[in-house]
């Protein structure tokens, strides 16, 4: 994946849950859930570089220290804790859902399903226009899929069932985010 880097990263503008940066029009704000991951970090940088107002949802906001632009909001929250999601989704137009639980060491498929359900319901309640979901490869009902890819398919199904508008993207979709213009077009 080749994405445009905005240059040296600066310290994050960290906000308490529920705080909204008054300099940004709320309807234009984009949420990246999963910004501490490989894809989420690069997507955040590309969106920042394109001038898109970004908010990141992170279980551990300190993990984003020095990795986001000063204009990017960081809200502490966890998709497994529904009470933390309304503040993160308030005023968001588009949300990128790049969350997975494979590294949990527990039943990641069940955790992924719960996290997606919580996020989808909170997004719908917050009036999010669309959720962009980076799914896995393979047909939805392919018995030959690995547990991981089945979980990715199930996560997409759960997000769609929430009633929020879901825009599925395959793994290659974000690889086209090479310029500020292409990042802007994904919003």
Image: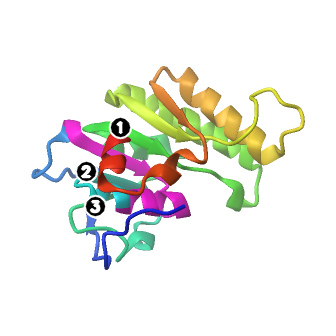
Looking at the image, which residue is at 31% across and 69% down?
6
Q: CA distance from mark 2 to mark 1?
A: 11 Å
Numbered badge on residue 49: 3
Q: Residue 106 occupies which quadrant of the picture?
A: bottom right
Nearest the eye: 11 or 15: 11
- Kindly tell me whether residue 187 is visible in this rendering: no
> Between marks 3 and 2, how big is the CA–CA gap?
8 Å
Viewer-nearest of discs 1 and 3: 3
Residue 101 among magenta residues: no
Residue carrying label 1: 94
Q: Which mark is residue 1?
A: none
**Which of disc 3 and disc 1 is earlier in sequence?**
3
Q: Quadrant of residue 149?
A: top right
Magenta region, residue range: 27-45
Horizontally, residue 115 falls left or right of residue 30, namely right
Q: Residue at x 10, y 52 (%)?
A: 23
179 lies above or below 120: below
Horizontally, is 156 left or right of 9 in the view?
A: right
Looking at the image, the residue that sits furthest to the right is 144
Q: Secondary structure at mark 1?
A: strand
- Front residue of 126/129: it is 129
Whether residue 161 is situated above or below residue 105 in the rendered picture: above
Q: Secondary structure at mark 3?
A: helix
Q: Nearer the viewer, residue 1 or 106?
A: 1
SS type, badge 2: loop
Say which residue appears at 22% left-offset and 40% top-offset.
28
Residue 140 at x, y percent in the picture: 74, 28
Question: Pointer 2: residues within 10 angstroms few (<14), some, or many (20+)?
Answer: many
């Amino acid at each position: 994946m080749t994405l445009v880097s905005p240059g040296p990263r600066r310290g994050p503008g960290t906000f308490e849950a529920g705080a909204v940066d008054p300099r940004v029009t709320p309807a234009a704000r984009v949420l990246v859930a999963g910004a501490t991951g490989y894809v989420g970090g690069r997507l955040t940088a590309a969106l920042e570089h394109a001038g898109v107002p970004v908010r990141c949802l992170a279980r551990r906001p300190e993990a984003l220290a020095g990795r986001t632009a000063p204009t990017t909001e960081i809200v502490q929250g966890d998709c497994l804790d529904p009470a933390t999601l309304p503040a993160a989704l308030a005023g968001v137009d588009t949300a990128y859902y790049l969350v997975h639980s494979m590294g949990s060491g527990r039943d990641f498929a069940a955790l992924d399903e719960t996290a997606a359900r919580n996020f989808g319901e909170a997004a719908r309640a917050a009036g999010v226009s669309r959720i962009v979901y980076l799914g896995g490869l393979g047909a939805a009902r392919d018995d030959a899929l690995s547990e991981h890819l089945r979980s990715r398919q199930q996560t997409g199904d759960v997000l769609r069932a929430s009633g929020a508008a879901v825009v599925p993207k395959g793994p290659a979709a974000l690889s086209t985010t090479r310029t500020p213009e292409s990042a802007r077009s994904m919003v």
